[in-house]
Amino acid sequence: MTPIEYNYKIYNKELLAIVRAFEEWRLELAGVADTVEAKFLEEFDFKVKYRPRK
């Protein structure tokens, strides 16, 4: 993480981790190496849900 990213709130760090994971595994997750989307995350079928701690 960059020095600025260390100052992110935890939920932004969690989203950053998701984005970085998708970037790292892009070819395996998308399944097509030559497909380019206008919005990076539109390539993936996922939902982000908030889970409050108990």
Image: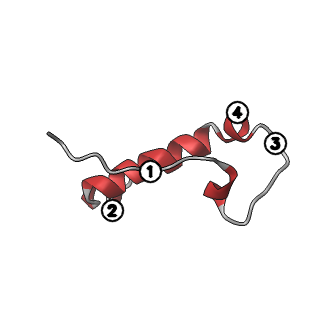
Quadrant in the picture for the C terminus: top left
Image location of residue 1, percent across then percent down: 38, 49
Name the residue rendered at 35%, 57% in the picture: 12
Mark 2 or mark 3, which is nearer the start of the sequence? Answer: 2
The amino acid pointed to by label 4 is Glu
Is the residue under label 2 in contact with that under label 3 (CB below 8 Å)?
Answer: no
Q: Return the mark for residue 28.
A: 4
Label 3: which residue?
A: 33
Q: CA distance from mark 3 to mark 2?
A: 31 Å
Is the residue under label 1 in contact with that under label 3 (CB below 8 Å)?
Answer: no
Residue 9 relative to residue 18: left or right = left
Image location of residue 47, percent across then percent down: 50, 49
Question: Which is closer to the viewer, label 1 or label 4?
Answer: 1
Q: CA distance from mark 2 to mark 1?
A: 23 Å
Crowd rating for badge 2 (residues with CA inside 10 Å; few <14, some 14–19, many 20+): few
SS assignment at label 4: helix
Question: Which is closer to the viewer, label 2 or label 1?
Answer: 1
Q: CA distance from mark 2 to mark 4?
A: 29 Å
Q: Return the mark for residue 48.
A: 1
Question: Which is closer to the viewer, label 3 or label 2?
Answer: 3
Name the residue rendered at 41%, 52% in the picture: 15
User: Is residue 47 in sight in this rendering?
Assistant: yes
Label 2: which residue?
A: 4
Is the residue under label 4 in contact with that under label 1 (CB below 8 Å)?
Answer: no
Name the residue rendered at 34%, 52% in the picture: 13
Between residue 48 and residue 28, name the one nearer to us. 48
The amino acid pointed to by label 3 is Ala
The amino acid pointed to by label 2 is Ile
Crowd rating for badge 4 (residues with CA inside 10 Å; few <14, some 14–19, many 20+): few
Q: Return the mark for residue 24.
A: none
SS assignment at label 2: loop
Residue 19 relative to residue 34: left or right = left
